[in-house]
Amino acid sequence: MERTTQKMIEIPRDVMTGEELWQPGVLSCQGCGASLALKLALKGLGRRTVVVIPACCMSIIVGSYPYSASQVPLLHVPFETAAAAASGIRAALDVRGEKDVVVMAWAGDGGTFDIGLQALSGAAERNDDILYVCYDNEAYMNTGIQRSGATPAGAWTTTTPGEAIKEEPKKDIEKIMLSHGIPYMATASVAYPADIYTKFSKARSIKGTKFIHMLSPCPPGWQIDSADSIKVSRMATQSKVFPIYEVEDGKYTINVYPEKEVAVGEYMKAQGRFRYIADDTVNAAQELTNNKWRELTGLADRKS
Amino acid sequence: MRQLLKGNYAVAEGARLCRVKVISAYPITPQTSIVERLSEICASGELDAKFIKVESEHSAMATLVGASSAGVRAFTATSSNGLLLMHEVLHWVAGARLPIVMTNVNRAVSAGWNIWADQTDSISQRDTGWLQIYCESSQEVLDSVIMAYRLAEKILMPVMLTYDAFFLSHTTEVVDVPDIERVDEFLPPYRPDFKLDIDNPRMFGGLISPDYFYEHRYTVHKASLEALNYYPEVCREFKDVFGREYDVTEEYQIDDAELVVVTAGTITSVARITVDKMREAGKKIGLMKLRVFRPTPVELWRNVLGKVAKVVVIDRNLSPGLGGVFANEIQAALYPLQTRPLIYPVVAGLGGRDVTPADIEGIINHALSSDDPAGAPLFWGLKQ
C-alpha cells in the first residue's frame, strides 16, 4: 500500500496551523483536487477575502442551502461571469474603503478557457485588482466529463468517446493571460501545497489582475484511483506537462524543478482517460512538452 | 433648475442625483450618449462613482451583480441587443433580489438591423422578474430614476425603466433638474441588511434543493407584487417634495369615456393630443398610459378599464405568432370580469415607424365604427 507509506512532504508549519477557512463536510468526490486547492488557497489569503464562484464543481461542493463550508463571504454567479462579478465587488469594496480585502474568482477550466474567457480578458485588459484562479481539471466535470478547451489531446471524455478522441492540444491559457500584460501569472498544483500557500500569500499583496492556473485532479474524470490524485498531479509536473512557475512583472521563475523525471507517456498511462491514445499522439505530446519546457527554462532566470 | 436635456442626458442626471456608486456599461446605439455623459461626470468628479467600462452588456450586468451584492448602489443603461445579451443575468439579479436600476432605450431587435423605437426588447424580458416602468418624457425619465431607487431598495427588486429610441432618447426637452440636496432627503443612502461582508461572512446565490426552491421563487413573486402597494406611496412622497405627480398608470379624460386608448411610451403624447381633439368634436375618448407593466397591475386595469365600452390597446411591440403583448395581458387581466369591454388590439409603429395624431384618430375611429374587435390584432399602417 503505497498510500500509507508515502511521506507528507513539503508542507510547512504555517500551512498546517493556519486559520481554517474552508470547513470539512463538503460535497466533493474523494480525492478531489479542487476542494483541497481552495482550502490551501484560503490559508494563504486569510480572512480578509471575498470569493466568487461561477457554475462549476465548486458550486455544489461548498454546500446546498442553508449550509456553506466557506468562512469568508462567497458569491455564486452565472457561468461566464466570474471575472466581471469580481470586478464589480472590487469596485464596491473600493467605494466602501476596504481596499485591503482580496476578491478572488474561483472558476473551473470550462468557466475560464471557454465560456468565461471574454469576461476574464476584459477584466485583465482593465487590470482590475482581482485574483482569478482557474482550477483546471481538464474537462466539464460537474456536468459529467465533457471536453473543454483545457482537455489535452488524446483524452477520453463523454463528448470525445473512444472513436473520436480529442485531437486538439490544450489551449495555452497561460500565454493568453500573459499577453494581457498582467502583473502576476502563476501555475500551482495540489501536489505542491507549500507552493500554493506561498503564491496566494504573495498574490494578496500585488495590485492589479493576478491569474493562477491550478492543476486540479479529478479522479472520476481522469479515471484514476482517488488515492492517487496527488501522485498523478505530481507526475504532471515531473513529466513537465504542467510546470510550476510564476511570472511577476514579466520575470519568469520556475518554482519546482522536478526531483525525478517522468515521461509524458508514463503520466498518461497512469490515467484511464488516456487509454485510447495512439502512440503518435503520445509522441506529439512529448515533443510539445519538451518544446514548452525548453521555452520556459529559456525565459526563466535559474539563478533566482 | 430648468435645463434643456435630451432623454439620455436626463437619465445621466438621474444617476448623478441618486449618487450611484458603481456604474458598468457598454455602448449601444441609441443609449450611447448616456455612457458618454456618465463618463464625463465621473471623470470630472461631479459624480463620485466607479465606472467600469466592460467588454459586453453581459459583463455589465454581471459586474453589477458583484457591486450590488457588496452593498452599493449600482446603475447601468442599455438597449435592444444589449438588453437581450443580459438576459441570463437579468434573471439572476431578480432571483438574488438585487436593487439595481437600469434604463433601457426601447429599440427594435434584429434581424435585420434597426436602431429605432420598438418595445419588443424590454417586452421580451418581462418574465425575468425585473420591474418594468415605461416612460414618456425626459422629465419623467429623470424623476423615475430617483423613484426607482426608492422602490428597488425598499422591496429589494431590480427596476428597468424604458423609453423610446430617438423619439425620446435624442429629443431635447425642458427638464426641471432637482437640487441634489432635496434628492438626498427623498432617497437615503443604500444600507442593505445583507451584503458581502468579511465581518459577517455569508454565502449568496448557491444551490437550493427542491425542498426550498419553490418557496424562494414565491418570495420573488411576492416582492414584485409589493411594488403595487409601495410605488403609489413613493409617488405621493415624490409629489410632496418635487411637485410632480406619477402613479402606476396615468388616466386622462377617463371618467365619462366610452372608449379608452391604452398606450406606453411616447405614443402616449400623441394619443393625449388626439384625445383632446376628438373630445372637442364631441367624442368621449379617454386615455390610459401604462407605466408599471411588471408587476402587472391587474386590479387597477380592471378598475379603470372594466367600466368602459371599448378599449383600444396600441402595442409598439410584437410577439410573432401572438400579436401585441400589452393587449394580450390586458385581455387576460379583464377576462374574469362579468362584463367586459370590447378590446381592440392594435400593433403600430414597429421599428421606429412614426405614429401620428392622424394614425391614432384613424385607429380610434376604426374601433368606434366596429362592434367586433375580432380578437386578432389590427396591424395599423402596414404596407400591402
Image (cartoon, helix red, strand yellow):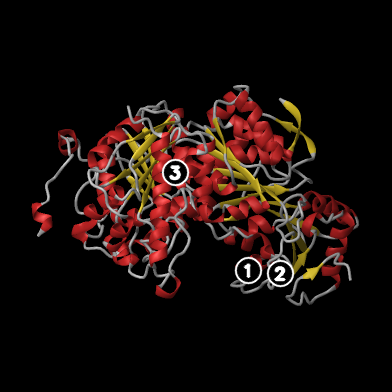
- Label 3–label 2 contact, CB within 8 A: no
Residue with the mark numbered 3: A174
Q: On screen, A204 above or below A190?
A: above
Foreground mark, 1 or 2, reads: 2
Mark 1 crowdedness (10 Å alpha carbons): few <14, some 14-19, many ≥20: many
Task: Check contact, mark 3 vs mark 1: CB within 8 A.
Answer: no
**Identity of the amino acid at label 1?**
Leu
For the residues marked 3 and 1, what is the alpha-carbon distance in whole angstroms?
A: 60 Å
Tell me the SS state at disc 2: loop
Amino acid type of the residue tagged 2 in the rendering: Gly
Indicate whether A249 appears above or below B371.
Answer: above
Q: Which residue is mark 1?
A: B334
**Residue B323: assigned label:** 2
Q: Secondary structure at mark 1?
A: helix
Q: Chain of mark 2?
A: B
**Left or right for B229, reference B69:** right
In the visual, does B167 lie left or right of A188? right
* Circle nearer the viewer, 3 or 2: 3
Please rate how many residues cluster around mark 2, counting C-alpha atoms within 10 Å: few if below 14, some from 14 to 19, many from 20: some
| Chain of the residue under label 3 | A
Amino acid type, mark 3: Glu
- Which chain is indicated by disc 1? B
Give the percent coordinates (x, y) of residue A229. Answer: 24, 56
Decide if residue A74 is on the left or right side of residue B237. Answer: left
Asked if labels 2 and 1 touch by Cβ distance under 8 angstroms, the answer is no
- Label 3, label 2: how far apart the Cα atoms are: 51 Å
Q: Secondary structure at mark 3?
A: helix
